[in-house]
Image (spheres, coloured by chain):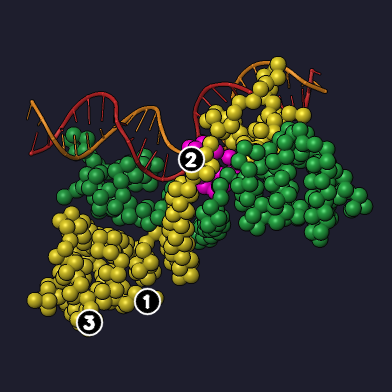
Chain colours: A green, B yellow, C orange, D red
DNA sequence: TTGCTCCTCACGTCACGTGAGGTGGC
DNA sequence: TTGCTCCTCACGTCACGTGAGGTGGC
């Protein structure tokens, strides 16, 4: 007539270990035993176990379950908090699910912010620009690339591609030509310079340093040279 | 110029401990140290850390992160699986959130299935019927109460209330009257008897036993007596 | 005797959080 | 000297899962 631990677990649709766990926490009273030490559960234990399972199924942590079991009518605030937590989790998961779907749709790599993915496609062995992009988008926030004038809407800007592939020993006139093209492109885009300037003013010292370090160590001399010219021209522009 | 562990963590927007954790797993290479043992992180570490954070932010477990970092282009199947897991979690959480909202809306206690809540309201100290309900709804599935003819749509059926409050020493004619009323009510409800009968035929031995045990130990003699009469009448009806 | 069930430790999971205890830098 | 930072163990979290090692029941 009485049930073993396994039988009780099966009746309640849960596991042997869960039953023992609840018992060790005092959520479920220890049943009487037979002479050989086997436990004998009865209907009161099944009822209690079903109530525990119901509460854990709703998402109550076990310490809250202990409280709710003894005063089920006063669990109002706990329920409100639970609902809030559930809603938060749902919106968070929905956001990341949408992001994962977007990554799948575009067929891009998941380890970069999506704005940077086209850059990764552009040139395989050139990781300097990619890594610079990772640091800059993190420090300045995503969207910075758009405001820099690059049209990362599916295809990399040819100028960006050329910059990322610029060899360290590129000749002076090639550097100058690329710099001028970039300056022209950035100047045509109406929105970027003020954004950049205001961002730069509000940047903390450590962020500045991180970007400077990224530029210095991740790009080669020719690339840095080109970016310096661009930067100087834009700064003149803003003043 | 190089960064301490704390500085690196701050730059990446994560914790000291997370950085050390990634390092201990080999996700992040150990940086060179100064003479006193202090670690010196550089831009490569920041880039790596940001890529790790991006992947964990999407929900990748750390062992998958290790793989994805080294071959970011081949994480397609991992992404598909991730999307599926996210979707499953979302629907599961939505279901429980809706259930929690319903509990809040009705102002009922969370430790019972919602169909049983009105029963709990009916009589305070009478837990026998409540506990029987918990066992029966779990074993036979929710919805069984509806098919038993009780209209649990906001108010407890007066007959149920009377049954749950029936004292053990109720007199014979009171028992008979209540049994007849219940039989009449159940017979008027068009849908229940076949459901019950078919369920009973398909029940396993352990479930039968659980219900029998619940009836025997959670109800008093008078209540069991009334239910026996009702059961007998219904069984005659079905044949 | 063999196979199945029951029992009690006790470590493992996952991604870190949180001290403990000691030392270096200013 | 004091306060702050850095370091390395190492245990804690949460709700159990998963053996290990031993015994009882048929």
- Mark seen at residue B64: 2
Q: Is residue B166 above or below residue C24?
A: below
Q: Chain of mark 1?
A: B
Residue at numbered disc 3: B190
Cα separation between marks 2 and 1: 49 Å
**Which quadrant of the view contains residue B200?**
bottom left
Q: Is there a contact, CB below 8 Å, between mark 2 and mark 1?
A: no
Identify the mark nearer the N-term, 3 or 2: 2
- Mark seen at residue B153: 1
- Where are the magenta residues, as a range? B51-69
Q: Residues within 10 Å of mark 3 (few under 14, many from 20)?
A: few
Residue in the foreground of this view, choosing between A46 and B89: B89
Q: Nearer the viewer, mark 1 or mark 3?
A: 3
User: Which residue is located at x 62 percent, y 56 percent?
Assistant: A154
Identify the mark nearer the N-term, 2 or 1: 2
Q: Chain of mark 3?
A: B
Cα separation between marks 3 and 2: 57 Å
Horizontal side of B103 relative to B69 (left or right) equals left
Please tell me whether mark 3 sits on a helix, a strand or a loop.
loop
Residue in the foreground of this view, choosing between A84 and A92: A92
């Amino acid at each position: 007539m009485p049930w073993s631990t396994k039988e009780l677990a099966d009746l309640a649709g849960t596991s042997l270990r869960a039953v023992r766990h609840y018992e060790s926490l005092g959520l479920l009273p220890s049943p009487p035993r037979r002479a050989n030490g086997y436990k004998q559960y009865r209907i009161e234990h099944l009822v209690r176990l079903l109530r525990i399972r119901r509460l854990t199924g709703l998402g109550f942590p076990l310490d809250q379950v202990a409280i709710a079991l003894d005063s089920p009518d006063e669990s109002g605030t706990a329920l409100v908090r639970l609902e809030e937590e559930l809603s938060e989790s749902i919106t968070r998961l929905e956001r990341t699910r949408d992001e994962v779907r977007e990554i799948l749709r575009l067929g891009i790599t998941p380890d970069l912010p999506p704005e940077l993915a086209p850059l990764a496609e552009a040139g395989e062995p050139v990781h300097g620009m990619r890594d610079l992009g990772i640091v800059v988008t993190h420090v300045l926030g995503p969207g910075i690339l758009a405001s820099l004038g690059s049209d990362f809407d599916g295809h990399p800007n040819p100028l960006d591609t050329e910059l990322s592939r610029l060899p360290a020993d590129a000749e002076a006139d090639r550097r100058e030509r690329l710099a001028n093209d970039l300056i022209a492109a950035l100047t045509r885009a109406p929105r970027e310079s003020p954004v950049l300037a205001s961002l730069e003013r509000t940047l903390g010292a450590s962020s500045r340093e991180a970007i400077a370090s990224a530029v210095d160590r991740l790009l080669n001399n020719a690339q840095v040279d080109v970016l310096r010219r661009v930067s100087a021209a834009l700064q003149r522009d803003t003043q």
